[in-house]
Image (tube, rainbow, N blue to C red):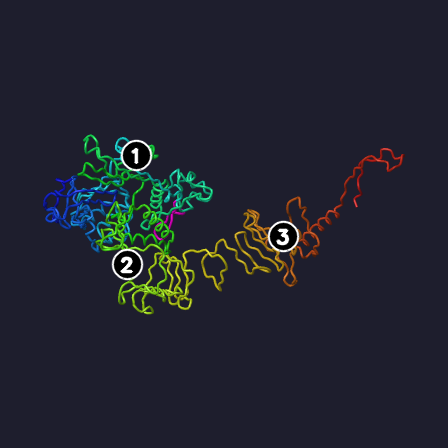
């Protein structure tokens, strides 16, 4: 049917007319992906001959401009037709190369608006952005390496946003479309045909996670987990210990529902090379697990466009929440979103085709997701310096799924060969000829991949490459080579390359910068560090080139050998003169001496105040022999069961200086025996005795009498009754 409304413009957006003869006008939009408009026009028409120009524009009824990129001419007998394919002007962002000095290697805590303003500036202000929701700040890595469209794609993926383009103004939302007024597809109302598929191929109930440099969140506080996540992990022994997460995975609440005795978990992996914060990795993994813990559900519905005949019916839009009801197809008002919409805005007899899904569709013609695909594949293939074979396996599995789901028609063109063309998008083609196999996504204007007798041409190769004699990248001495010698860069001659790795693993490099390294053995100048020094912690630990070591503090496990200890304090250590036999030991328990049999003979203990003030002696067989102690207010005391104070030299006898008292507690009955002393050896004794003798003699000379009183007694004789009384003595 002729279309009076599709407007056409030149490359400068100057109107050139209306496409009167255009028909089969189809508009295909995919969530966060390609916005494409295509139509047919007779090659003999004025529309084709005068109005349609490569890189010109058309405008649809929504006021959106599309760039004319492809004109595919077809002959059917005498009928000459051109299929015109256009993409939304938003994709002109791919034509703006980012200035080299605008590239961001790494930045932390960046707001989305900062990056979008940069993208707008790169386009000279031609494109602008409007943010309609609040987004968290994120760390950014490798931003702006290629084109403005690739940078926008990175912003969308990093901040988990969705875009709604309005020509050169791009609106940023968390979710586009209506989420409240759910659009309904129902049999006997608007469903003409439908198909329903649920796929558990990518089902995940245990999601592992890695971030930059292969690190994980192991050791992170379990307080960062939700109550549900914590409860699920606590069911796994050792997953949470001492309040810390000890595993690098999350479990789905549906783990028991989907698991079986043979396969208790369906494992997946979330690798985020741009994330360095464990909490951010946790958030990312939480989102990825929610997307994959249920089977992927996809519905394709051809629905009557009731809005074309009833103005009270609103048309569906991309991103709208929708539900589908078809009991015989087991579709019982399943809630999903419109992720792809194919519309025929100018044909009443053609109806919209809609794809509903609970996940984001991805395929090889997804223009945004396809940007920088090879770089992202390599980022994910290499994790912590090791090739991850599971990514190869996942990519191969997904390739099989994509091929099986492809709707393809076979054509035998007049020029020969076999052409396999996708029905939904005729630009996706595979041609088989005697010269080789080619793959194209733009209607055979260019070839994305090819296999010929000369070799294989491909943007990205996924899988294990076979045996090669040599692989070269670059030319002259500005070259990287892989061959039977090893890997080298910087010189055509392997032996002269400033960087090279031979087959034995030996590495030569002019300069090495490593964020981290594990060196299990070293060989620095014949195994020694010569003429160098060590400095850790800005002087906290140093070793000079002369071998002098200075450490702020340290702990030593094992033996320390030294000829001299000079200064300082040794605390809490066992110090001994020998490991066994005769020795002296000192530690926190005190100081001890040992004989040749290993028996403790002398002790100064630290167990009590009295112990630390005493020297205790033990006998030959270890029994208590005595002690020297210092009691409070009692001076110095010596105790022993048998105390001997002696001198072997009579010329130098034992001397007591000061007053000596032979006494002690009453219970000991102190006494002195065995003394042999002359009267002259005791000072003053002779004079005292002479004085007493003189006094006695004087009293005898004067005459001394006294009386004696005896009690009554008879000396055993009966005749002496009551004999007794007081009697005087004689005077002599």
Camera-nearest residue between 90 and 599: 90
User: Does 5 sit left or right of 471 as displayed?
Assistant: left
Can I make out residue 154 in this image? no
Q: Which residues are magenta?
A: 207-219
Q: Quadrant of the N terminus?
A: top left
CA–CA distance in space, label 2 to label 1: 48 Å
Camera-nearest residue between 49 and 496: 49
User: Does 371 sit left or right of 500 as displayed?
Assistant: left
Q: Are marks 3 and 2 in contact (CB under 8 Å)?
A: no
Q: Earlier in the sequence, mark 3 or mark 2?
A: 2
Q: Toward which corner of the image does residue 344 lie, by quadrant?
A: top left
- Picture coordinates of residue 541 (x, y %)? 39, 58
Element at label 1: strand
User: Which residue has dot 1 on it?
Assistant: 324
- Picture coordinates of residue 509 (x, y %)? 33, 65
Figure disc tally: 3
User: Which residue has dot 3 on it?
Assistant: 626
Q: Which mark is residue 434?
A: 2
Q: Earlier in the sequence, mark 3 or mark 1?
A: 1
Residue at 30% x, 43% y is 360
């Amino acid at each position: 049917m002729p279309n009076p409304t599709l407007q056409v413009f030149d490359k400068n957006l100057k109107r050139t007319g209306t496409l009167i003869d255009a028909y089969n006008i189809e508009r295909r939009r995919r969530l966060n992906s390609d916005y494409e408009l295509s139509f047919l026009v007779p090659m003999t028409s004025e529309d084709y001959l005068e109005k349609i120009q490569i890189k010109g524009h058309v405008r649809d009824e929504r006021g959106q401009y599309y760039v004319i990129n492809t004109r595919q001419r077809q002959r059917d007998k005498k009928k000459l037709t051109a299929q015109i394919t256009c993409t939304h002007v938003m994709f002109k962002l791919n034509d703006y190369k980012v200035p080299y000095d605008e590239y961001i290697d790494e930045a932390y805590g960046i707001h989305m608006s900062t990056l979008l303003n940069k993208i707008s500036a790169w386009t000279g202000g031609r494109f602008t952005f409007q943010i309609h929701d609040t987004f968290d700040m994120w760390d950014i890595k490798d931003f702006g390496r290629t084109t403005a469209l690739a940078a926008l794609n990175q912003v969308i993926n990093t901040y988990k946003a969705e875009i709604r383009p309005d020509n050169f103004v791009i609106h940023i939302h968390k979710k586009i479309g209506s989420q409240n007024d759910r659009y309904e597809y129902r049999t006997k109302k608007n469903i003409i045909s439908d198909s329903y598929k649920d796929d558990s191929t990518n089902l995940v109930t245990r999601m592992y996670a890695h971030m930059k440099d292969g690190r994980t969140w192991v050791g992170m506080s379990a307080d960062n987990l939700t109550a549900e996540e914590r409860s699920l992990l606590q069911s796994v022994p050792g997953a949470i210990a001492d309040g810390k997460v000890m595993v690098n995975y999350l479990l789905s609440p549906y783990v028991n529902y989907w698991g079986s005795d043979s396969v208790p978990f369906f494992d997946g992996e979330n690798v985020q090379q741009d994330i360095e914060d464990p909490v951010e990795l946790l958030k990312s993994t939480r989102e990825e697990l929610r997307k994959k813990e249920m089977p992927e559900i996809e519905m394709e519905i051809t629905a009557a466009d009731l809005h074309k005949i009833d103005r009270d019916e609103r048309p569906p839009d991309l991103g709208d929440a929708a539900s589908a009801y078809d009991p015989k197809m087991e579709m019982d008002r399943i809630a999903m979103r419109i992720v792809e919409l194919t519309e025929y805005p100018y044909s009443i007899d053609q109806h919209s085709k809609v794809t509903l899904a609970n996940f984001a569709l991805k395929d090889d013609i997804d223009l945004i997701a396809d940007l920088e695909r090879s770089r992202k594949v390599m980022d994910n293939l290499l994790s912590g310096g090791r090739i991850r074979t599971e990514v190869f396996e996942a990519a191969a599995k997904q390739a099989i799924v994509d091929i099986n789901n492809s709707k393809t028609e076979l054509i035998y063109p007049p020029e020969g060969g076999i052409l396999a063309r996708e029905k939904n998008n005729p630009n996706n083609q595979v041609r088989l000829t005697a010269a080789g196999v080619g793959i194209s996504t733009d209607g055979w204007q260019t070839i994305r991949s090819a296999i010929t007798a000369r070799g294989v041409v491909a943007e990205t190769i996924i899988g294990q490459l076979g045996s090669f004699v040599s692989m070269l990248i670059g030319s002259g001495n500005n070259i990287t080579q892989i061959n039977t010698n090893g890997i080298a860069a910087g010189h055509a001659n392997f032996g002269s390359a400033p960087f090279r790795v031979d087959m034995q693993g030996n590495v030569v490099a002019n300069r090495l910068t490593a964020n981290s390294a594990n060196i299990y053995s070293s060989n620095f100048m014949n195994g020694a560090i010569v003429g160098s020094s060590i400095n850790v912690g800005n002087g906290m630990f140093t070793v000079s080139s002369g071998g002098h070591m200075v450490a702020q503090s340290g702990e030593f496990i094992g033996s320390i050998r030294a000829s001299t200890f000079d200064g300082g304090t040794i605390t809490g250590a066992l110090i001994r003169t020998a490991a066994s036999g005769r020795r002296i030991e000192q530690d926190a328990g005190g100081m001890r001496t040992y004989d040749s049999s290993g028996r403790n003979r002398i002790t100064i203990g630290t167990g009590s105040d009295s112990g630390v003030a005493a020297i205790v002696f033990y006998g030959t067989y270890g029994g208590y022999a005595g002690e020297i102690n210092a009691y409070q207010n009692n001076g110095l005391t010596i105790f022993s069961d048998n105390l001997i104070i002696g001198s072997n030299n009579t010329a130098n006898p034992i001397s007591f200086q000061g007053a000596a008292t032979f006494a002690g507690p009453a219970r000991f009955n102190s006494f002195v025996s065995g003394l042999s002393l002359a009267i002259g050896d005791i000072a003053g004794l002779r004079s005292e005795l002479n004085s007493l003798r003189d006094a006695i003699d004087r009293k005898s000379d004067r005459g001394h009498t006294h009386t004696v009183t005896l009690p009554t007694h008879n000396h055993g004789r009966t005749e002496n009754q009551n004999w007794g009384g007081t009697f005087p003595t004689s005077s002599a």
